[in-house]
Amino acid sequence: WVAPWSLNKWGVAAAAVALAGWRVVRFSKIANEEKLPYTVTKVASGSTTVYLVGTLHVSPRCPGDVRATLEATKSHVALIELDEERLRRRVSYHGIRTEDAQEVSLQPDGETMHLGRGWQASDQGLSTDAARAVWNRRWASQTVTGVVRYDPDNPHGREPWAPGSLAGHFALIDRGDPFPLAKRAWHAGRAGAVGLVVISDRAMLPVRIVQERVLGRLRTAVQQMSGGDPPVPVLMLSQDAGAALKARAQAGHKDVLSCLFRGDEFPARSLAAQLCQDMTLLCSGVAVLYGIMECAGVEAGGEFTAADEMATQLGIPCVCMDVDLDRLCSRLGRSLLPTPLNVWNAVRLWLGFPRFLVTACFPGTRRLDLLGSVVLHVAAFKLRTWAAFALALVVTTQVCRVSGFFFSLIVGGVGEVATAGNVVDSAGRGNFEDTVNLLMVLFIWPQVATAVLFDRDEAMYQAIAARAASAPAGGEYRMTAVCGAAHANGILSKIAERGLS
């Protein structure tokens, strides 16, 4: 006589009590002398101790957890789930680092320039540090020299100069409005300039001068009739150094600027590669999700900025441990190929899925409580975050439906070929296409998880192990690793299995 809804109600209540009770017992067994946040798991291997902070990238709780962990543990190094490119983009105006700066030399014309305004004495005359463009690598190990010229009629370089009017010169411009610097470099190159020097409009220099987003690059490619990089290198000077150089150029001095360009490992993608990567992120819904969060003013990945700032404050290095976007997309493409090894990997992951669910619901003391951490992070959401997340979920669902439409076209094509080849008859074509669709989904999902999660777990574990191996001999070495909660247990299991030696 008990209604079905009553059974469901009591079943849910029993599950909730079991999950909560397990976590109470688990928490009582964890030794937490440092009074770390619940989202942190401590694991020791030899003389190295790793404090792994599991985060949810849009949660406002994450930066506080990271700061508290770094301060409480007195770690010797912080590792974050970013590659160098993404970290540099996040902290682009937090001050250029020595390893990112490009030295620029100046031979003043006539009277010596007043020192102390961004310029220092050097063997070549005067020198200063400048920010460099990602496409400057084309001139690596080459010295480019030219007379500095400032055009008051075109102070920002928005308008094209007359062809040949800047031959042998470095064009000096003000940063000014957000008009793309790549487009200004095209204007300078078409006028015969050897390079473009930009005076920053901010107190600090960017880590790199990067290309526009893909739509802006497409516009520039159409306008310039070229999809390649600008034809001249671009440098950006600080406000003080740039203002001093500009004043001398306006006074008629013909100062000679020279630069021996350095090599650069910062990623610089072609327009075609950037277009492919952006389309992949768009079709997956990831770009839409984080794009809407950004438009709503919700910070994503604030824990990484907090880790970098806290590491600087404590005087310890902040090291990246994730793969870059090029490697991620390449691995994703390879994992979706229906090779026997990939098919077996998909089968193996589905067989292990029940075990994953059990360990996620009832984690041990040596694992991160994924479910509990997510609940704590979600509970910290502000109203704006909830609204942005709900909107992003709706829009992402529609984007995935569009992706599903193209997916159904592929399945329909397979059905058409099978019918034409008499593999199935017309009556059984619908069931055949449903079977193909199911098999493709069962193959694609675990393979995407392999590329996006498990392979990155391995890369981050390798980065942690490499850092532990380089630790000074003698004494305890402490590391704080900051990563998404979904990666935490993969990394922890590898440390438990293989250690950090």
Image: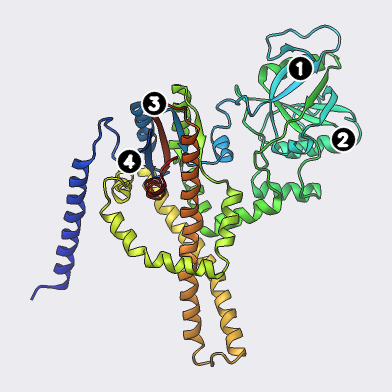
Q: Secondary structure at mark 2?
A: loop
The residue lying at 58 percent from left, 89 percent from top is 419
* Quarter occupied by residue 71: top left
How far, Cα to Cα, is label 4 from label 2?
Answer: 59 Å
Type of the residue with mark 2: Ala
Q: Position of residue 429 (x, y in %)?
A: 51, 87
Name the residue that disc number 2 marks.
191
| Quadrant into which the N terminus falls | bottom left
- Total count of labels: 4
Q: Give the residue displayed 58% in from the left and 25% down from the top.
A: 95
Select label 4 or label 2 by which is in front.
4
Q: Position of residue 378 (x, y in %)?
A: 33, 46
Marks 1/2 in contact by CB < 8 Å: the verdict is no
Whichever of labels 4 and 2 marks the residue nearer the N terminus, that label is 4
Q: Which mark is residue 41?
A: 4
Q: CA distance from mark 4 to mark 3?
A: 21 Å
Query: Does residue 70 appear anywhere in the picture?
Result: yes
Q: CA distance from mark 4 to mark 1?
A: 53 Å
Residue behind mark 1: 245
Residue reaching furthest to the left: 1
Do callouts 4 and 2 mark residues in contact (Cβ within 8 Å)? Answer: no
